[in-house]
Structure formats: structure tokens, C-alpha cells
Image: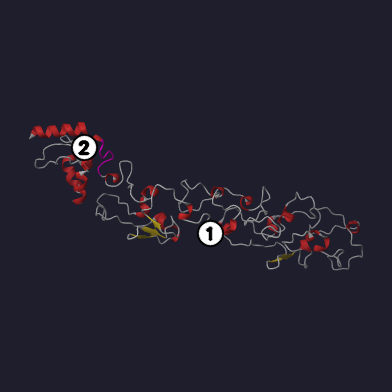
Amino acid sequence: MHGRVCLTIAMLSVAGCEIPRDRPAPEGYHGSGWSSKLTGGKHAIWLRDNGYPIEDCQVCHGADGAESSVLPGCSDGGCHEQGVTFCGTCHGNENGPRPNDGAHEKHRSYCIECHAVPKSIRDPGHLDGMNDVAFSGLAKANQSSATWNAATNTCSDTYCHLGTNIEWKAPNATATPCNMCHGNPPDSHARFATVATPDSCANCHPDASSSSHVNGIVETNPLTCSTCHGQGQLGAPPAALDGSVDASSRGVGAHRRHLDETLADRIGRVVACTACHVVPQSSNPFEHIDTTSPADVSLVLGNYDAETGRCVTSCHFDTVPGPAWTDATGAARTCDACHGFPPAFTRKGTKHAPCQPTLAACLSCHSFTPESHVDGVVNVTP
């Protein structure tokens, strides 16, 4: 008997688990092929069927299957290199605990989001033969209800996949399209037609393959006003968020007339965005991006009628509704678009002196340039 034990030890030490072991099976020893990978892993089946009595293995092999003075360890010969109680011993492999079935490959970093990961191999509910799904953490972020249907192998209302129902056993080999989890682009981006296209996500968001994707936070790249609307440094339409470039579109309107100092035929000084809008401190706060169209108009002086697209401000002579915002005919650039030509009254309420309706007649009393025109001060030549 002693000779058999020595022979067994020698075979285990030299051959490792990969070679079938053809040896006697006296009382107290494993049978032939017990630990061979080539015979279907008899010991793994026995352990599973008997509730994983790891303690029984440790009687001979020591703690965690370590090598003893009599028998080799379970980590010899290329087996259980990270210890018998390593998660990959039962599911996954020596490189990690992730199983190869279903969509585990697509969820390699999210064990704890879908399972109650035990701290010890003997924790209650572990080793009971049941694959329990218990959503937590990221799966339930943003108040998602996150439910699992074992009958259909689908999860629903998880943060990870938004409102879609995802089949767990979907093939791993194919790339996951963006619209499996959210629209491409999402419906909430409909007003960003200029920049939100299926191929332009990276303009505003980190690459989907990065660690900042599906992390519970909507990440954005550094943005400027002109990322979404406007061009160059102007930061205002055209183009509008819906892609419009025509002045007859409300999103475009007279933005250039008010903001672009490079226009050769402008008749007044440019104004700041803050004269008509509450400009956000950052280009990407959600209260700015997630508001619905049209844009909020909050004039510093005066008021704006969204129905007619006209404002009443000092820029357009106080009480008289100014030109239509979307007037693309050029009529808004004429003198009588804002005040009489000549005006009937001065700003003080007195009658204006009679004169001819010509620019030359105006300039005989009022000397102005685009920078000094529409600046709140009436320039009168001494």
C-alpha cells in the first residue's frame, strides 16, 4: 500500500492534471481519472453534487488545497493556480470568475450589479445550485426598477439598458448597436439635429468604449456655445439646433444682425447674448441642454412676444414693436423699421423738427456710426 501511495504522489507531481491517472482506488483514495481534465472533471461533478464539501478536501490537501507533506496541492500541475476557493474554480476560469455563457462577456466588470457576490464561499445562498439575479448599484441607478425574468432570460428597466428589454442569451460575437439601449441619437436629442447624428456622438460625449460609458453619469466632452449652435467664435445661429440656416427660421432669425460685427452693412452695434438670453455659466449644465425649444428669451430691457416674434425694446424705439425676428426680406434694416423716417416725436416727447426722409437729412443733425447707433444715446450734432 505504501508503494502505491508513493507512486501516486510521483505521478501527480510530474504529470499534473492534464494527464489521465490510471491508478488503483483503495478505500480513502480517489478513483481513476478523478482530477483529469480529459475525463470531464469527475471531482468537479462530485463536489457539485455533494454541496461542495471543500472541507473534506482540506483534510488531506491542507487549507485551500495547499500542498502537504504527504500529498501534492490542488494547485500543482496547472490546476487551481489561484486556489481552490477562487471564484473561477467553479465558474469562469483561472483568469477570472466570468462565465462564458450568455452575455457575460459583454458584462465582464459588473458581477455585483446583477448578483449578490459572496464574501466567503460558504455565505448563505451561495453553492445552492441556483443562479440568483439580484440587481443593485449601477443596474438600479437613476431610480430604475431593474427586474429580471428568468422564464424569458430578459432584464428590463435597468439603467444600463434604459427602458429596453434585453435578452441575456443574445449572441456575444456581434457588436452591441447603440440603439439596443437608447436611441441613436436618443429622442431627447431631437432638437440637436445639427450635431446629434448617429456618427457624431463623440463630438459631445467620450467614446463609448471608454470607462466613462454606462457608469451612471452622462459624461460630456468640453463644449463651447458653437459646438451646438453657431459657427466659429460667434456661438449663435446659423446654423440653428435643428439644422436651419435660413433667416426665416425662428432658430436662425436675426442672430447675425445682432451679433456678427463682421457684417459690412450693419447699422448698429452688436449686442451681447445676455441682452436677450440667460446665458448659462457652463455649456453643458442639464438645465440648459435639456430644456425644450424654443429658446428662452429674457430681455434686459423690454419684452418679447413669442407669438409674433417681435420685441419691444429701446433698441427698436421703446413702445413700438420691432421688426419681425424672422423677416428675411431686408426690410428690418430700413430706418422706419424701428422709428419714423423722420420720427414724429423725439424721445423726450416733443415734436421732431420737420425734415426730408433721407439719410443725408438725418446726418445733418445726427452724426452716428454703427458703433454709436442703437446705443441708448441720441447723438445730436451741435
**Mark 2: which secondary structure?**
loop
Q: Which mark is residue 73?
A: 2
Q: In whole angstroms, how far apart are the C-alphas of marks 2 and 1?
A: 58 Å
Mark 1 — residue?
187
**Image quadrant where residue 125 sits:** bottom left
Residue 349 horizontal side relative to residue 28, left or right: right
Between residues 154 and 146, which one lies in front from this camera angle?
154
**Image quadrant where residue 8 sits:** top left
The C terminus - image quarter: bottom right
For the record, the magenta segment spans 78-84
Residue 380 horizontal side relative to residue 74, left or right: right
Tell me the chief SS of the magenta region: loop
Q: Residues within 10 Å of mark 1 (few under 14, many from 20)?
A: few
Q: In x, y percent, where is residue 352?
A: 89, 66
Q: Which mark is residue 239?
A: none
Is 89 located above or below residue 332 in the figure?
above
